[in-house]
Image (cartoon, rainbow, N blue to C red):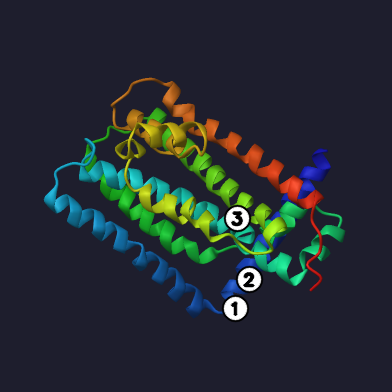
Amino acid sequence: MLLKRKGAVRLYGHYLSINVRSAMQYKTSFFLTALGQFLVSFNVFLGIYFMFRRFQSVGGFTYSEVLLCFSVVLLEFSLAEMLARGFDLFPEMVRTGSFDQVLVRPRNEILQVLGSKFELTRIGRMLQAVVMFCYGVSRCGVEWKFLKITAVIFMLIGGCAVFSGLFLIRAALCFFTLEGLEFMNILTDGAREYGKYPVSIYGKKTLLVTTFLIPYALIQYYPLLYILDRDSSLFLIFVPLLAVWFLLPSYALWRFGVRHYQSSGS
């Protein structure tokens, strides 16, 4: 089992190496695209800025606290999009029949789909998130200690798991539709947009749904309360790790889809 896991890690590293070398063949295109990702994301930043020019707070959260919140969500989403981009492009594999080749290879199909594409240009968006995070930290007066840094790290781990799970669900649905379902963008790109504000401002029902059904609140709102000293419960530090459970139903749907997969005939 250990040798099998080591082999999977080596293969994943090999896929990553191939994608990096491929991207570096056109360095100018790579850096310009990454720069574009960096600049485009500032549209949301400007939207938040102009809104807070009129309002002092939203749902009890100040401008710097909202920036802190949104920067973490943006970083979570960008990490998942960079590492799990293969799932986002999976409809093309099903439509062209290339997934048939994946199934006959003696390697895990999820690993092969993951390794088919890494969106390395998302580094630009991640850098923008880091800039926003640093600005928010400098303005909101958070006294950073080891436990708060740990909470941020757990937020990134949990957030990457949640968004990767959503990409996996979107890919699994393609087994039955042969096309990517655009409504899933509401749960991925949409979550990135409305995730710029703490989930609590959307009402108690939304907070309930995002706590127990699609756990956005676990990777955003609850640990944020601890970081901003609004709740001293140490349990909130580890709440983002609970969001990793979302990968289980996502994987179950994927396995169900694989078992019922029929080639598109392309």
Q: Amino acid under label 1?
A: Gln
Nearer to me, 36 or 189: 189
Say whether residue 5 is left or right of residue 227. Answer: right
Q: The C terminus appears in which quarter of the rendering?
A: bottom right
Q: Residue 89 got which mark?
A: none
Q: Amino acid under label 2?
A: Arg
Say whether residue 171 is left or right of residue 258. Answer: left
The part of the image, by quadrant, that contains residue 180 is: bottom right
The number of numbered discs placed on residues in the rendered structure image is 3
Q: Marks 2 and 3, how far apart in space?
A: 18 Å
Q: Which residue is mark 3?
A: 84
Say whether residue 128 is left or right of residue 163. Answer: left
Q: Position of residue 28 (x, y in %)?
A: 48, 79
Q: Amino acid under label 3?
A: Ala
Q: Position of residue 174 (x, y in %)?
A: 67, 58
Can residue 150 be seen by looking at this rendering?
A: no
* CB under 8 Å between discs 2 and 1: yes
Q: Marks 1 and 3, how far apart in space?
A: 22 Å
Above/below status of 51 relative to 200: below
Q: Select label 1 or label 3 by which is in front.
A: 3
Q: Position of residue 37 (x, y in %)?
A: 41, 67
Lower position in the chain sequence, tag 1 or tag 3: 1
Q: Marks 2 and 1, how far apart in space?
A: 6 Å
Above/below status of 218 relative to 27: above
Q: Which residue is mark 2?
A: 21
Q: Which residue is mark 1?
A: 25
Q: Residues within 10 Å of mark 3 (few under 14, many from 20)?
A: many
